[in-house]
Image (cartoon, rainbow, N blue to C red):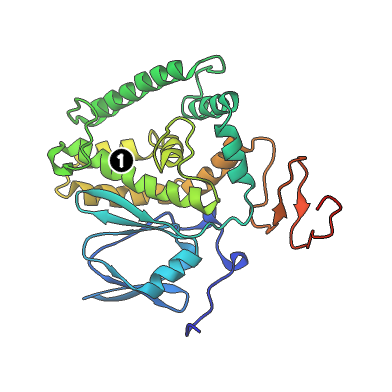
Amino acid sequence: MIPGAKPPDSKQLFRVEDRITFLHLERCQVSRSDNSITATDQSGTIHVPAAAISCILLGPGTRVTHHAMMLLANCGVTVVWVGEEGVRYYAHGTPLAKSTRLLEAQAEAVSNRRSRLRVARSMYEQRFPDEVVDHLTMQQLRGREGARVRALYRYHAARTGVAWNRRDYKPDAFLESDDINQALSAAHSCLYGVVHAVVVSLGCAPGLGFVHTGHSRAFVYDIADLYKADLTIPVAFDVVAGGATDVSGETRRRVRNALRGSNLLERCVGDIKRLLMPDEGPDLNVEVLRLWDESGDLVAAGQNFSNVSDW
């Protein structure tokens, strides 16, 4: 029996769209006090309700206790270890959703060429609402996207006066990139952590992407791309234009502030539901367990079928 408060059940937890986007901690001891996470360093201890957090970014110098990780997992909080030269993803909590309807809809849509293309077109339409894309192939969508994103980089370079050549991301040599590419990588990493938290909280599969594929976070990259133009790209150029000495640290703080005022979690939840189940809004908190049948009907679980005539 674990001493202290019992873990909260799903009805006591905050809905994912009502949570804090992310909390970045470094050089501290992360532990647990009842149903709160504590962070202790030389200046003292702070308490944060675990059920109110969407994603925790653990930076260099952090130590976390076993009880803290259990609480974060029970509350569906995504935990990401953040290195000084980039982000490495290691763990996430259990889904907040008790229904698999979104997961099943995602798997069905991604497994069919027409429905997969429909979702990809819908993603593109959201990013660039002034274009008609209902007739475009994936190759044409990629071409349009590449042109629009390059134009977006040039626009913010002209707006801020930041020198821009091209997007250059080196996962194993973060500090070899120029300041603007470091800022973009840091900003996008924060966004990926938050979006990943939403994806797994809704019970979806991070690896089943519609535009991206073959990676364990393909769907995370799909969804995150919906918000870069409004959030992370402008922040990255503003940080570099301001002459920040700690580019990645200042970028994380600016992204945190931008996400706080953007209703990102609410938008992200709504967008995923709209993309995967455009005609209905599933209740993800209803716990229903049934058995599959090849006839297409669902069979009630928790029953003994040993007396079935076909046995």
Give left or right: position of 9 versus 159.
Answer: right
Neighbours of disc 1 within 10 Å: few (<14), some (14-19), many (20+): many
**Lateral position of residue 228 relative to residue 245, left or right:** right
Taking depth in this image into account, of 88 and 145 the one nearest to the observer is 88
* Apparent side of residue 73 relative to residue 160 in the rendered image (left or right): right
- What amino acid is at disc 1? Val
Q: Which residue is mark 1?
A: 235
Q: Would you place residue 121 above or below residue 205 in this image?
A: above
What element does badge 1 sit on? helix
Give 105 or 199, whichever is nearer the viewer. Answer: 105
Q: Residue at x 79, y 58 (%)?
A: 305
Percent position (x, y) of residue 58? 30, 60
Residue 241 visible in the snapshot: no
Quarter holding residue 168 = top left
- The relative height of residue 10 versus residue 44 in the rendered view (above or below) is above
Q: Is residue 303 visible?
A: yes
Q: Residue at x 50, y 20 (%)?
A: 130
Residue 227 place in picture, x, y as percent? 42, 37
Q: Residue placed farthest to the front in the image?
A: 311
287 sits to left or right of 186: right
Q: What is the x, y in percent for residue 295?
A: 77, 40
Query: Residue sitting at 74 percent across and 63 percent down?
Result: 302
Q: Position of residue 213 (x, y in %)?
A: 43, 33
- What residue appears at the point 27 percent right and 23 percent down from the top-left corner? 154
